[in-house]
Amino acid sequence: MNKITINKFVNSILLSYSQIFFSANLFLASLLFFVSFIDIYIGISGLIAVATANIFAYIFGFNNNNIKNGLYGFNALLVGFGIGVYFKLTILLLVLIFFVAIFTMLLTVAIEGIFAKYRLPFLSIPFLIAIWTFYLSSKEFTYLGISQRGIYYLNDLYNIGGQKLVDIYNWANNFNLPQSIKTYFISLSAIFFQYNILTGLIIAIGLLIYSRISFILSLLGFYSAFVFYIMIGSDITQATYLYIGFNFILTAIAIGGFFIVPSKTSYLSSILIIPLVVILTVSLSVIFSVYGLSVYSLPFNIIVILFIYILKLRVNKRNFLTEVLIQEGSPEKNIYAYKNNIKRFGNLYKYFPIKLPFFGEWYVSQGHNDKITHKDEWQHAWDFVIIDNNNKQYINDGNKVDDYYCYNKPVIAPANGTIVDIIDGIPDNKIGDVNLIENWGNSIVIKHAEFLYSQISHIKAGSFKVSVGDTVKHGDILANVGNSGRSPFPHLHFQIQATPYVGSKTINYPISSYIVYENNKPKIKTFTNPKVNQKITSVNKNSMLAEAFNFVPGKILEYKISGDSNVDKVKWEIFTDIYNNSYIYCKKTKSAAYFINNGDMFYFTKFVGNKKSMLYLFSLSIYKISFRFIEQLQENDYIQVNNIFSKYIMTLQDIIAPFYMFLNAKYKLKYLSVINDFTLNKIVMESNVTKSVFNNEKQKFNNKIIITDKGIREIIVKDNNNKTIIFENDD
């Protein structure tokens, strides 16, 4: 293996340790790796198992990303722990661990394939099948010896770390703590098949440093079980002795903050579901004791998978108990990404982008659930017309269809798709008349995705430029506006639906982007519904802006950066990851700025890496850019708080984030001017970033952006200390 491959392989082993706590954090992984060697035989057994599983996962050619993040290794790691704790460490045992690790890895891939169809996690089910299989078969392995080393455990510790480690171990285990806290630490240590307070204490510290939410949930899960055990007259210490006390901790973390976005209701759910885990643990223990087996993590697996599955079956997916759709790697990142995306795009920020079916400025004459025809099953629709400065829809006396501004105007495809239905040949009505028999008039239906169609109606007969079966792109001209069907005067009817028929019932689906005029000032709206009486404009591209932000994979961005009398150069490259997410990568600082270009606008989604890098400043200065230039247009957006605040203040926000956000960060962009002369065409914009603590706002950056036909020509960044940094493109 070359150096890069070895580094990746080592990381894949380490991250297998942290994946036990649903984490891909190297700090926590390294700490847990160390903890596993407090019992050196368990540590060796686990390391051999996870290394074997990952090597064979590479050889078999399985998903590199899953290997790298430890997802194919942590089940084998647990099997190694489970075998190492009960049997003497011999050559025979190591050989058996080798084969069982391969078996576990194959189980992991197979079970992942089954569960992925239902978007469910496989958790530690492969570990359970493998460890039970081994224990049942080991009764016939006469050359395996049962470990007796617990009797000489202090001797083992002395051999590892000398008298100091023995003293620390004795101090931790003899420290005067309430019994419940001791039991909590022992429950944590049981995850690594150990039974001592020191291991649990180190794991708890690591968990607290890695994730405040996970740490709090671990306490909630444990103490919910502790109280319930008292209520039913049972002894929770028995659960820790049998290495099953961790079920309550892992269940609370999984439901309270990892697979569900952390919130008051996710915390409450994790508390209320723990008694079910207790009951399941007790009942399954009775059954499994017949075969001399422990239930291990079975209760945790059953409850968590069952809970996530039933959430997917909800008809009404309310705002509480929201599933994590894009896993960010920790409960804190999950909640900050979710809250920021809700503020930026609403609940539908990941939906297929549907735009307006026309060019230019139009007026919403009828909106959703309006007074005339948009009712009941057809309430989610819009009617559009064109009006003049006197709010009139027509010239002359308005008695002819030709008098109306919108009549015969082009109708365009609101998004990419395929034409699935067209009705044509219905003549235009005279002004004031309606055709109630052919209610929809001439219409077209376009399929954009499964269960996602758009319908445009009241089209002019004979004006269609497309046919059924044609593929269209956004902006392609389809036909012209008419006055057919139930239409007393020319207008355009537009609706989104789940089925491919003219007249299908509508669904509540937003327009991805448009400009609305409020108090005669333009304002960009994203993923929301136009309202009645609004003047709106489709977001048509400014070619210079669109080209400047056409960041395609393989493109190199080079800038000269000057500030504080220093001049430096940076070189960044555009990549896409395995999930087709685009990002700008700085090799020098190992930083990445993820972005989306949806054709209408360019915006960053997250930043990973060194916040002292120039790429970080670059991404904040152009955080969101619409390709529609309107002078004095102002855009407002929100920045994910953990991408801008220091880790110290974030520690407090982490603790109370499920209940209250006292940190906020905003981005504002203003389109100033377009300058055209004989030598250079350029667009000038101004952006600023502000952050607030308990609504006390403070400006952090003020930026001037200059775009030319050569791309992003210059960005001038001034921070709140009047420090100036200039990005300059010399091309």
Image (cartoon, grey):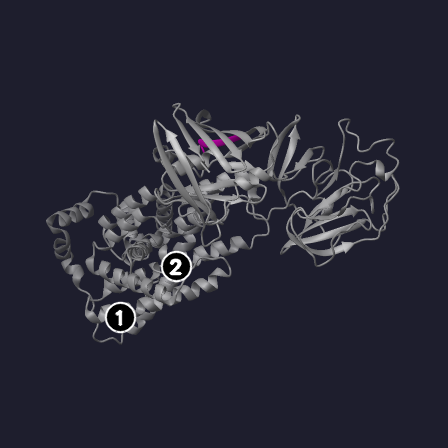
The answer to whether any part of residue 473 appears in the image is yes
Question: Mark 1, residues whose alpha carbon is within 10 Å: few (<14), some, or many (≥20)?
Answer: some
When the figure is inspected, residue 45 is found, relative to residue 673, above or below; the finding is below
Instruction: Please name the residue that numbered disc 2 is placed on.
Output: 64
Can residue 537 be found in the magenta stretch? no
450 or 228: nearer the viewer = 450
Q: Residue at x 45, y 54 (%)?
A: 578
Q: Residue at x 36, y 39 (%)?
A: 610
The answer to whether any part of residue 291 appears in the image is no
Q: Which mark is residue 96?
A: 1
Query: Which residue ends up furthest to the top in the rendered image?
Result: 722
Label 1 sits on a secondary structure element that is: helix
Which residue type does callout 1 highlight? Leu
Q: Could you tell whether 87 is left or right of 296 in the image?
A: left
472 or 354: nearer the viewer = 472
Q: Quadrant of residue 542?
A: top right
The residues bearing labels 2 and 1 have C-alpha atoms spaced at a distance of: 26 Å
When the figure is inspected, residue 61 is found, relative to residue 360, above or below; the finding is below
Which residue type does callout 2 highlight? Asn
The stretch in magenta equals 660-669
Q: Could you tell whether 486 is left or right of 58 in the image?
A: right
Q: Quadrant of residue 336?
A: top left
